[in-house]
Amino acid sequence: MTPPLPLTAQQIQFFNEEGYLIVPDVFDPADLEPLRRELAAEIEKKVRGLQAEGKLTNMHARLDFDRRLAALYRDSKENGETIMRHLEGLRGGGFHAPEMFDVIAQPKLLAKVASLLGSEEIVASSVYRIRPKLPNIGRGVVPWHQDSGYFSEHCDEHLIITCWVPLVDATIENGCMQILPRTHLGPVVEHRTGGNAGFLIIEDKDLPDHPRKAITAACPRGGVVFMTNRTPHCSTPNYSDHIRWSIDLRYQSADSPNNVGLWPESIGTDGQADDAFYEKVTVACYPPEADFLVHSRKTPEAVTDYAEYVKRREVYDRTQSKFSAYRRWPNRAGEAQPARSGH
Ligand SMILES: O=C(O)CCC(=O)C(=O)O
């Protein structure tokens, strides 16, 4: 088998200068089929559950993966939200089927990530998201932010790579991302709470390139948009007739702060870990979620397998509600805010 290709020197230079890189053919679109099928199966399971509870009559069973959830949401916002929250996995252990793990640990992707990190010792972060952006529903529109706005300050100077992976062709019409190029070497600018759907937001006046000269990051299925944690980006509404499915994955070098190997000594009946765990785990860039070693040239035997990945996610899920020490930002009126929930 030929080893997966790294990025070219020109691609790496582009990423370093621009703060982003779009590679249209990281995956064969067929590589993403198992994940699409598994997500569709998960929707089917949820739909059957809702039907059994008498909450839903039209299952929209004939609609394909790119349309079904939108029709279910149109019929009932409540049912749609239930299914979306389940898939998005925020504070719920997350969707962690083997098909998800296989994409996170896909050698074709990791070879490119290694090129950008300049390291073959790669830690994957559990801060990944599954985003079904439904047509004409504002909820999936993500305001301007830097991912570092969500991470702890001590990681501002470390490189954490976001890999944005569309599961359909992402276009301006269905709400792909917008990116501010050449601004990623500046600081983490002020974010405010109270953006759309609970997201953080950088006000226009605080954007590092104001008035902004954003690029539209259209990307075909099979492609990946790579960004740094300080690259300002947002996403626009979906005006198409189908769902803009995407996932976003995050990786960092094993030299950057992380919580690999950190487990609670014990978890009480209330689901909370021992205090020592909460203290130690603040070393991570995003303490509430489990990091894991996804690739290593030096110690391949230490790479996390699927069973351990699931265990880590589940253990961290039980402790998540205790994490309130997120980075604090003022609200849109400029008033200091108490701790808030995550990305
Ligand atoms: O998928 C989107 O619409 C936004 C994604 C995003 O903001 C991110 O990956 O950080």
Image: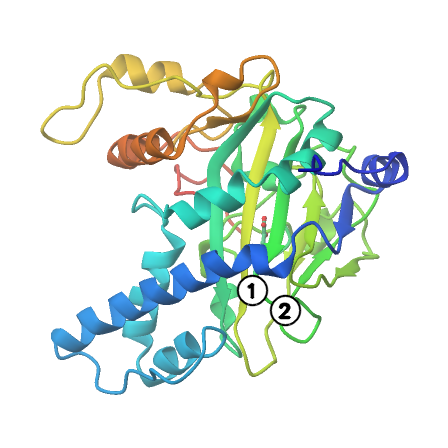
Look at the picture and state if 62 lies above or below 279: below
Name the residue rendered at 27%, 87% in the picture. 58
Callout 2 amino acid = Gly
Badge 2 crowding class, 10 Å Cα cut-off, few under 14, some 14 to 19, many 20 or more, is many
Q: Which residue is rendered at x = 77% and y = 33% of the image?
A: 186
Label 2, secondary structure: give it. loop
| Front residue of this view, candidates 69 and 78 | 69
Work out which quarter of the rendered image holds the N terminus and state it. top right
Name the residue tied to disc 1: 141
- Viewer-nearest residue: 198 or 147: 147
Mark carried by residue 175: 2
The first of marks 1 and 2 along the sequence is: 1
In the displayed structure image, the side of residue 216 where residue 30 appears, left or right: left
Whether the residues at callouts 1 and 2 have beta carbons within 8 Å, the answer is yes
Give how far across and how far down residue 302 sits, in percent: 46, 17
Is residue 130 toward the left or the right of residue 256 in the image?
left
Separation of marks 1 and 2 at Cα, in angstroms: 8 Å
Q: Quick check: is the Cβ at mark 1 less than 8 Å away from ligand 1?
A: yes
Looking at the rendered structure, which numbered label has been put on residue 64?
none
Q: Nearer the viewer, mark 1 or mark 2?
A: 2
